[in-house]
Amino acid sequence: MPPAAPILLTPGPLTTSARTRQAMMLDWGSWDDSFNQLTASLCEQLLAIINAANTHHCVPIQGSGTFAVEAAIGTLVPRNGHVLVLINGAYGKRLAKICKVIGRRFSTFETAENQPTTAADVDRLLNADPRISHVALIHCETSTGILNPLSDIAAVIAQHGKRLIIDAMSSFGALPVDAQHVPFDALIAASGKCLEGVPGLGFVFARKESLANAQGNCHSLAMDLQDQYAYMSKTGQWRFTPPTHVVAALHEALLQYKEEGGLPARHKRYANNCQTLLNGMARLGLRSFLPEAIQAPIIVTFHAPKDPRYQFKTFYERVKAKGFILYPGKLTQVETFRVGCIGQVNTIDMHAAVKAIADVLREMEVLDI
Ligand SMILES: *Cc1c(COP(=O)(O)O)cnc(C)c1O
């Protein structure tokens, strides 16, 4: 008998619905009209989620989320540009690494992993260094679950006449952003996070003029969003082999997103998941790493129990045997583990996950309850 499907409490890949997985049972021709319509409909629906149709193009790109981030920076930052990278976790560090590898000048501003970047910080940094052309920010830093104050920071950057690139990978579709009120050149997300598709494609909302002016910027053929967009708008097709099954699954996931009630409903379900998790874990005496005021309802970092009998690997395997996949911590200084609140999961699943965690910690003689 095959093992029952585990529930993924991770930041992606995550638990998807049977209906979304079922949508992958058909093979599509990449030049076929019906597939091209699927892509066009996808882009239209994605733009609507952040009210960006008037100002931005949606450019999908093959690969995991990082491919889309690298494509956005490589395409939209000119070779003589300078990126200020705002860092409070591993994904912020990755932005800086991308700039370094593809040869864009950059500087970094790093705060502690439990410290959001503030608009005042960004104002000061932009005043101090006129070379900066672009600012890159992580909306929800998935390495802890911290939420950075996107709209305040975006407003300051616009006042300075600079450009903003947002990695909204783990927040898009669940936390509201209105492109007509939050000015940005690029906002980046992917199929396999809060939209509850399967992993395999990213997409970039690129400001129309910025994309039009980006010809020749990119260091790479495959990563060139300007070229990808130009080809797609001319032919309706992807430039290179599209991830057909991923597109079909995301299209189906978006139908369910709409049926559920769109962003407000998705946000509410995740917020309820997060609160159920926080309350349940607090009852077990397990402390979350972030104060609730800066905790996004996406993923929660918990301090590992101090008991010497606790070991993540054993803990992980035993919780997995009870049907839940957890995520290791990503902090260098403190021992932690993470539990995701996103995916096709609800408060019943979160209660069950907390119970599984409690049972395992009791079996490991870590919890005396
Ligand atoms: C998931 C994620 C990414 C992309 O990671 P991949 O492993 O390339 O999919 C980028 N930024 C953030 C904040 C993320 O949560």
Image (tube, helix red, strand yellow):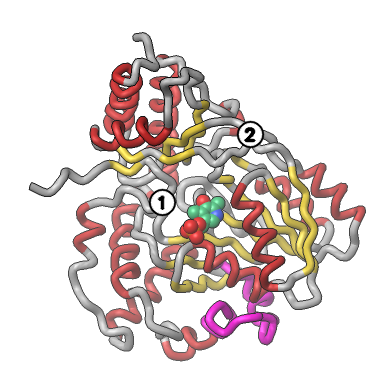
Residue 213 on the magenta span: yes
Seen in the image, is 148 located left or right of residue 244? right
For the C terminus, the image quarter is top left
Which quadrant of the view contains residue 312? top left
User: Depth check: 38 or 218 in front?
Assistant: 218
- Secondary structure at badge 2 equals loop
Residue at 78% x, 63% y: name it. Answer: 106
Q: Which residues are drawn in magenta?
A: 204-229
Asked whether mark 1 and ligand 1 are closer than 8 Å, the reply comes as: yes
Outermost residue toward the top in this view? 369
Which quadrant of the view contains residue 83? bottom right
Residue at 27% x, 81% y: name it. Answer: 34
Three-letter amino acid code at the position of disc 2: Gln
- Secondary structure at badge 1 equals loop
- The mark found on residue 333 in the picture is 2
State the image coordinates of residue 152 (x, y, percent, origin top left): 72, 45
Which quadrant of the view contains residue 113? top right
Residue 367 on the magenta span: no
